[in-house]
Image (cartoon, rainbow, N blue to C red):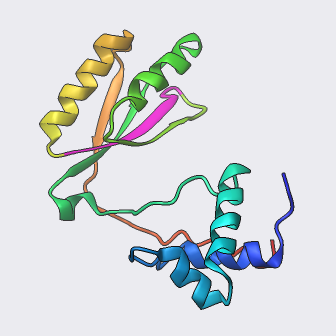
């Protein structure tokens, strides 16, 4: 992976929180940092291409938008993990999907307008994959932490 210079680090620190909600957010960032908009765009594009930036997007509180969220876990045989994960990822309400080293080895979060819809989608996933041991762990409280990674000295 290519090394990050000081300007890359400054941009990364700036875009993690308080991203400008304007028609030209990179121009606002460029102006804040004393850079040209093209330079910020070029660097962000490069950082995404090399995998430093995975995604740029908003984070929402599902409940404030009238949605429900749940954490799900499944027992998936090793030889079916990839196809199970692909099946789960086809649903737009799945926001995270990851493998863990435990009996329930695939975990994912699901957001939908209702718990009934989530349960229906979990049943679809089960029928499509043959995986019947999927548990639904609805959230009972929300604990949001601010994930800000200071890359100044990295």
**In-image side of 14 versus 109 (left or right):** right
Q: Residue at x 52, y 13 (%)?
A: 80
Q: With respect to residue 34, does 89 lie above or below?
A: above
Q: With respect to residue 6, does 43 lie above or below?
A: above
Comparing 22 with 118, the one in front is 22
Q: Residue at x 37, y 9 (%)?
A: 130
- Residue 77 visible (yes or no): yes
The image quadrant of residue 115 is: top left
Our reading of the magenta stretch's main secondary structure is: strand
- Residue 75 visible (yes or no): no
Comparing 153 with 22, the one in front is 22
The percent position of residue 4, horizontal first and vertical second, equals 82, 67
Q: Residue at x 54, y 75 (%)?
A: 26
The percent position of residue 72, horizontal first and vertical second, equals 36, 36
Please check the rendered image and state whether residue 7 is part of the magenta-colored stretch, yes or no.
no
Please check the rendered image and state whether residue 111 is part of the magenta-colored stretch, yes or no.
yes
**In-image side of 49 versus 147 (left or right):** right
Q: Residue at x 60, y 79 (%)?
A: 14
Q: With respect to residue 101, does 144 lie above or below?
A: below
The residues colored magenta run 103-112
């Amino acid at each position: 992976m290519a090394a990050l210079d000081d300007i890359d680090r400054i941009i990364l620190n700036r875009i993690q929180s308080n991203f400008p909600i304007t028609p030209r957010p990179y121009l606002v960032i460029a102006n804040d940092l004393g850079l040209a908009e093209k330079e910020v765009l070029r660097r962000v594009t490069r950082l995404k291409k090399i995998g430093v930036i995975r995604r740029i997007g908003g984070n929402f509180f599902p409940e404030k938008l009238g949605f429900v969220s749940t954490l799900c876990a499944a027992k998936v045989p090793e030889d079916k993990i990839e196809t199970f994960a692909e099946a789960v990822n086809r649903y737009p309400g799945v926001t995270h999907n990851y493998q863990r080293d435990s009996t329930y080895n695939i975990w994912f979060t699901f957001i939908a307008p209702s718990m009934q819809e989530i349960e229906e989608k979990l049943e679809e996933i089960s029928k499509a994959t043959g995986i019947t041991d999927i548990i639904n762990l609805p959230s009972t409280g929300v604990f949001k932490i601010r994930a800000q990674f200071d890359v100044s000295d990295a």
